[in-house]
Image (cartoon, grey):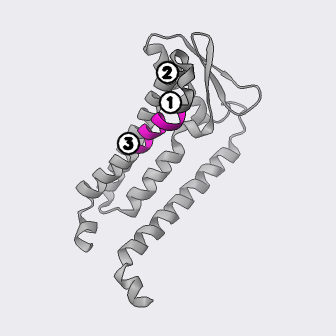
């Protein structure tokens, strides 16, 4: 058993580091959500911000967008040209995806500066692409409501997770030379 662990030391280290970072960041995010009472920013600051920024982006595309607090659940209703098209819920704010991204990058970290810059840049890119994704999804739901299932459950998750996968592969192949030497 010990020989097997030594043989796969780098794999075990990667998995343990990934899980540790993921669990810590997820617990921190859960604490943030638990302390967000919705009194000033509903349902929480980040989800509210994403809803406002998505509204502004939709307006930029030439549509009249509006957001209002959902009366029955912690979310923001998103309207395009006065038609309710989507709910911006906590899962739409991209933080869970960013946590997943950061966990992988730290598990494959090499130099602190490069890792930090890549995490910062990648997180901003994920956040911005998520805003674009919400705006395009909302316009798509406005124009093609019968395509809701494929737009929301297939195409747009594929965009955000596909981009995260590409960022991971770029990191491993471009910046993580130390890990390649040990493999």
Q: Which mark is residue 140?
A: 2
**Inter-mark Cα distance, 2 to 1:** 8 Å
Q: Is residue 15 left or right of residue 52?
A: left
Ranked by sequence position, the earlier of labels 2 and 3 is 2
Q: How many residues crowd mark 1 within 10 Å: few (<14), some (14–19), many (20+)?
A: some
The local secondary structure at tag 2 comes to helix
The local secondary structure at tag 1 comes to helix
Image: 147 above or below 3: above
Q: Is residue 126 left or right of residue 114?
A: right
The residue range painted magenta reads 152-162
The local secondary structure at tag 3 comes to helix
Q: Position of residue 138 (x, y in %)?
A: 53, 22
Image: 38 above or below 113: above
Q: Which residue is mark 1?
A: 151
Q: Are marks 2 and 1 in contact (CB under 8 Å)?
A: yes
**Inter-mark Cα distance, 2 to 3:** 20 Å
Q: Quadrant of residue 91?
A: top right
Ranked by sequence position, the earlier of labels 2 and 1 is 2
Residue lying furthest right in this view?
72
Q: How many residues crowd mark 3 within 10 Å: few (<14), some (14–19), many (20+)?
A: some
Q: Position of residue 15 (x, y in %)?
A: 45, 68
Quadrant, the C terminus: bottom left
Q: Nearer the viewer, residue 147 or 105?
A: 147
Question: Image point 43% across, 53% down: which residue?
Answer: 102
Q: Which residue is mark 3?
A: 163
Ranked by sequence position, the earlier of labels 1 and 3 is 1
Q: Which mark is residue 103?
A: none
In the rendered image, residue 72 lying in the magenta stretch gets the answer: no
Camera-nearest label, 1 or 3? 1
Q: How many residues crowd mark 2 within 10 Å: few (<14), some (14–19), many (20+)?
A: some
Q: Position of residue 34 (x, y in %)?
A: 70, 47
Q: Nearer the viewer, residue 149 or 124?
A: 149
């Amino acid at each position: 058993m010990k020989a097997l662990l030594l043989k796969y030391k780098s794999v075990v280290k990667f998995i343990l580091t990934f899980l540790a970072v993921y669990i810590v960041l997820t617990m921190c995010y859960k604490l943030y959500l638990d302390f967000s009472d919705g009194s000033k920013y509903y349902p929480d600051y980040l989800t509210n911000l994403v809803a406002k920024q998505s509204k502004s982006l939709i307006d930029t595309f030439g549509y009249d967008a509006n957001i209002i607090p959902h009366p029955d659940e912690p979310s923001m209703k998103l309207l395009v040209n006065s038609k309710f098209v989507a709910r911006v819920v906590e899962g739409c704010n991209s933080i869970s995806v960013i946590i997943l991204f950061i966990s992988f990058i730290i598990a494959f970290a090499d130099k602190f500066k490069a890792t930090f810059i890549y995490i910062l840049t990648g997180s901003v890119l994920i956040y911005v692409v998520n805003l674009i994704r919400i705006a395009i999804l909302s316009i798509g739901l406005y124009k093609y409501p019968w395509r809701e299932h494929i737009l929301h459950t297939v195409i747009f998750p594929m965009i955000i997770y596909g981009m995260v996968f590409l960022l991971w592969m770029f990191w491993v192949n471009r910046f993580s030379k130390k890990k390649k030497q040990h493999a």
